[in-house]
Image (cartoon, helix red, strand yellow):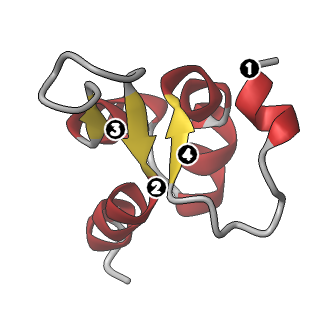
């Protein structure tokens, strides 16, 4: 289990999660949204930020942007 899956708040207010945490949820998200897992995986990849200026910080997924993209994909 990725560390941020355990240490972050469960409030849903965290703006970013690790790539590992996002990938852990692919099947659940795909099932809940009626998408194929590969569609969710691509959306995660499209909304992955590789740290500040691509150099500093760990890569992470912008959850807000990812959810907005998933909403568009499902017509919400």
Q: Earlier in the sequence, mark 1 or mark 3?
A: 1
User: In what element is the residue under mark 1?
Assistant: loop
Q: Measuring 82% from the left and 18% from the top, which residue is drawn there?
A: 1
Quick one: label 4 or label 1, which is nearer the N terminus? 1
For disc 2, the marked residue is 63
Tag 1 and tag 3, C-beta contact below 8 Å: no
Give 57 or 3, whichever is nearer the viewer: 57
* Label 4 – label 2 distance at C-alpha: 15 Å
- Mark number, residue 18: none
- Tag 3 near tag 4, CB within 8 Å: yes
Q: Position of residue 37 (x, y in %)?
A: 48, 32
Residue drawn where x is 21% and y is 38% of the image: 46
Q: CA distance from mark 1 to mark 2?
A: 16 Å
User: Which image quadrant for residue 3?
Assistant: top right
Kindly report which numbered mark, 4 or 2, lies closer to the viewer in this rendering.
Answer: 2
Q: Which residue is mark 3?
A: 39
First of labels 1, 2 by sequence position: 1
Of labels 4 and 1, the one closer to you = 1
Residue at mark 4: 30
Compared with 18, 33 (above or below) is: below
């Amino acid at each position: 289990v990725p560390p941020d899956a355990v240490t972050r708040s469960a409030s849903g207010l965290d703006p970013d999660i690790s790539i590992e945490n996002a990938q852990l949820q692919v099947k659940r998200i795909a099932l809940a949204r009626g998408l194929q897992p590969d569609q969710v995986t691509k959306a995660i990849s499209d909304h992955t930020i590789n740290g500040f200026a691509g150099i500093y910080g760990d890569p992470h997924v912008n959850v807000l942007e990812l959810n907005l993209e998933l909403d568009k994909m499902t017509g919400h």
